[in-house]
Amino acid sequence: MFTKILVISYYSPCRGHAGGLRQLDLFRKLKQINTNISIDLVTCKNSIMDWGLEDLTLIFDKIIWLENNQYNIEYIQDKIIFEDYQVIDLHFFKSGRLIKHLKRHYPNILVIYSPMESQLRGACISLTNIFKHWSGKNLILSIILACHEVYYVLMSDRVSCVSKSDSKFVSWLKAKNDVFSIETAVSELGLSNDFYSLLTLNEFMRRPNRLIFFAYFGAKPNYEALKWFCNYVHPLIVTVIKDYKLCLIGRNLDDKIVNISNYTNIEYVGEVDTIAEITKFGSIGIAPAIWGAGIRGKVHQYAILSMPCVASLLGVDSLKYQNDESIVLAEMAREFADGCIKLLQDRELAYTMGARAKEVCLKNYTWDAQVGNLKKLYQI
């Protein structure tokens, strides 16, 4: 049984972005599983993304902060004695470049590659969308990144994926026993016990009848998804429901975001302290996703709050929510708009769908449901 783990992460675990929130939840759960393990962290500072760092000292025993230009094996090995650890977990794509050195010089250490999103799967998605949303330049870049990922996957001992869809692609390259699907679960941070109980219809009806897009808007997939929604879906909804509102909630609502969403009926809320606060602004969530792989946590976040969601197929790929029962799935702009209109006009349907989504989430997407996989992955 291993008790000493080193996490090397290009982006810091924090509440400011989906990957960081996943890290906080995952490593907090590891500490709950085995109180005797020690988890140290090496990570970079990022003034734009870092937010909610107060949780770090409650989870990690030692933290070493780096500048971006210091994120290389030469600098890190001056700060860390790698032989002290039994497991080294490398988070995010840029950490993959450390694998070759670690496996060459420390063959007895279990090296896990945790990319957060599969570049290989992302490249395949890009190929299918090349005539819809992507340029040839972006496609070439995506293929180059996928080639790097192939090398990282083959060099590492194990790969930890954030979804079953990502793990299927990675399994083409590696033995299935060495590929783990640790599905992103709903975060308990910022939620009281009240949010795990059943919401009544009257309580739901008191929430504003508005759409919500809750995201970190500094991430390119969220930026592109918002751009697509504003250009193609939003005008269709307005033609039917003149006074409908879309609330944008999250960090990085800068001028760039305002420029692509400069339409009537859109409200800029910005950052909130806890996820629970989004229910003050609306009752229906949206999760448009037009490209990319990796974390799809928005649907879980809406679901745990008993909020129905309209999502693109890519946004819920491999998840257990069922179309027209616990979620509304749509591919084209017209379908997406119709789904939003249906929920905005039928409040009882929206309530019922939100309640079913919560049931699916609590049954399948809590961190307790991942305990068995976590024990196997980290050998704790």
Image: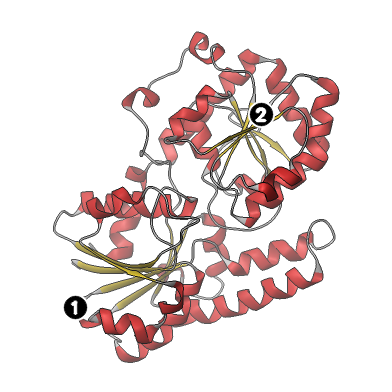
> Where does residue 374 sit, x and y in percent of width and height?
32, 57
Label 1: how many Cα within 10 Å (few below 14, some 14–19, many 20+): few
Q: Is residue 300 above or below residue 97?
A: above
In front: 375, or 242? 242
Residue 99: x %, y % from top left = 41, 81
The residue drawn where x is 48% and y is 55% is: 49
- Position of 85 relative to 341 (above/below): below
Residue most toward the left?
Answer: 36
Query: Residue 358's x, y, as percent?
Result: 48, 29
At mark 2, the secondary structure is loop
Residue 370, compared with residue 199, is above or below; it is below
Q: Quadrant of residue 103?
A: bottom left
**Labelled disc at residue 262:** none
SS at circle 1: helix
Write down the residue under mark 2.
Answer: 324
Q: Quadrant of the C terminus?
A: bottom left
Pointer 1 residue: 84
Quarter of the image with the N terminus in it: bottom left
Gap in Å between the C-alphas at discs 2 and 1? 52 Å
- Residue found at x 72% / y 28%: 340
Sequence-first disc among 2 and 1: 1
Residue nearer the viewer, 168 or 101: 101
